[in-house]
Image (tube, rainbow, N blue to C red):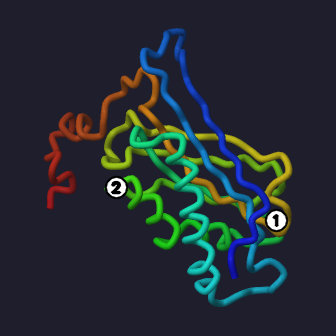
């Protein structure tokens, strides 16, 4: 069964000034969303979610990846994912569409990412805030790319829907100056290449 798509949306935020100072090269946060019918809605407790995951997740992963790359091209640096399931579904239904390689690897492979995709999943009514955490696609220790996209869709998710989203950044957080994880490790006297001391 292919995804039953009601709507796709794009959100692009460009920051020209932060902290009262101009951003020399404006940064961008980009989000692609798809609103789909929840394939498990009204079916009671479904023991095995994998058949629908394997059919729908690659389709929407490919769709959202294409939407993101149409905006960012090769300039993409940060990435993440999120989902919100309507009140007629389970949190597991939201997670099912994002916590699978059938979805995430469509994006990761297209951008040659080395990091995993930061994520959030929640359950709520129409207008529930969608929060997409981001980090650098190749290096999870670069705090310059720890950013969060916040937005909501006034009429989604309906009770029988799931919103699935991918997020991306072009550039890091404007005027980043808190340092990186590696500097903290050095401050603590730990080996940057072996932080656990193993």
Q: Nearer the viewer, residue 172 or 2?
A: 2
Q: Label 2 to label 1, Cα distance in Å?
A: 35 Å
- Residue 168 vertical position relative to residue 46 in the rendered view, above or below: above
Which residue is situated farthest in the bottom direction here?
47
The location of residue 149, given as percent across then percent down, is 59, 40
Q: Could you tell me which secondary element the residue under label 1 belongs to?
A: loop
* Dot 2 or dot 1, earlier in sequence: 1
Q: Residue at x 15, y 40 (%)?
A: 189
Q: Quadrant of residue 163?
A: bottom right
Q: Residue at x 71, y 53 (%)?
A: 8
- Residue 15 vertical position relative to residue 104 in the rendered view, above or below: above
Position of 158 with respect to 69 (left or right) is right
Mark 1 closeness class: few <14, some 14–19, many ≥20 residues within 10 Å: some
Q: Nearer the viewer, mark 2 or mark 1?
A: 2
The location of residue 124, given as percent across then percent down, is 78, 58
Q: Residue at x 77, y 69 (%)?
A: 37
Position of 8 with respect to 57 (left or right) is right
The location of residue 108, given as percent across then percent down, is 41, 59
Position of 194 with respect to 153 (left or right) is left
Quadrant in which the C terminus is drawn: bottom left
- Residue 170 vertical position relative to residue 166 in the rendered view, above or below: above
Residue tagged 2? 112
- Residue 14 vertical position relative to residue 115 in the rendered view, above or below: above
Q: Quadrant of residue 196?
A: bottom left
Q: Nearer the viewer, residue 158 or 105?
A: 105
Mark drawn on residue 87: 1
Q: Are marks 2 and 1 in contact (CB under 8 Å)?
A: no
The location of residue 88, given as percent across then percent down, is 83, 70
């Amino acid at each position: 069964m292919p995804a039953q798509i009601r709507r796709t949306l794009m959100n692009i935020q460009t920051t020209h000034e932060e902290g009262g100072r101009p951003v020399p090269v404006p940064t961008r946060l980009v989000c692609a969303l798809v609103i789909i019918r929840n394939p498990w809605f009204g079916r009671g407790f479904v023991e095995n979610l994998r058949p629908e995951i394997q059919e729908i997740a690659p389709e929407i992963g490919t769709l959202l990846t294409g939407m993101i790359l149409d905006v960012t091209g090769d300039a993409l640096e940060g990435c993440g994912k999120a989902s919100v399931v309507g009140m007629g579904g389970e949190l597991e239904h939201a997670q099912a569409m994002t916590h699978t390689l059938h979805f995430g690897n469509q994006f990761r492979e297209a951008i040659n990412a080395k990091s995993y995709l930061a994520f959030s999943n929640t359950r709520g009514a129409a207008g529930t805030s969608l929060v997409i955490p981001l980090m650098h696609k190749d290096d999870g220790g670069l705090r310059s790319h720890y950013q969060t996209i916040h937005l909501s869709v006034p009429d989604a998710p309906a009770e029988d829907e799931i919103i699935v989203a991918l997020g991306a950044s072009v550039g890091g957080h404007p005027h980043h100056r808190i340092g990186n994880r590696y500097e903290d490790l050095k401050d603590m006297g730990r080996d940057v290449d072996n932080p656990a001391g193993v």
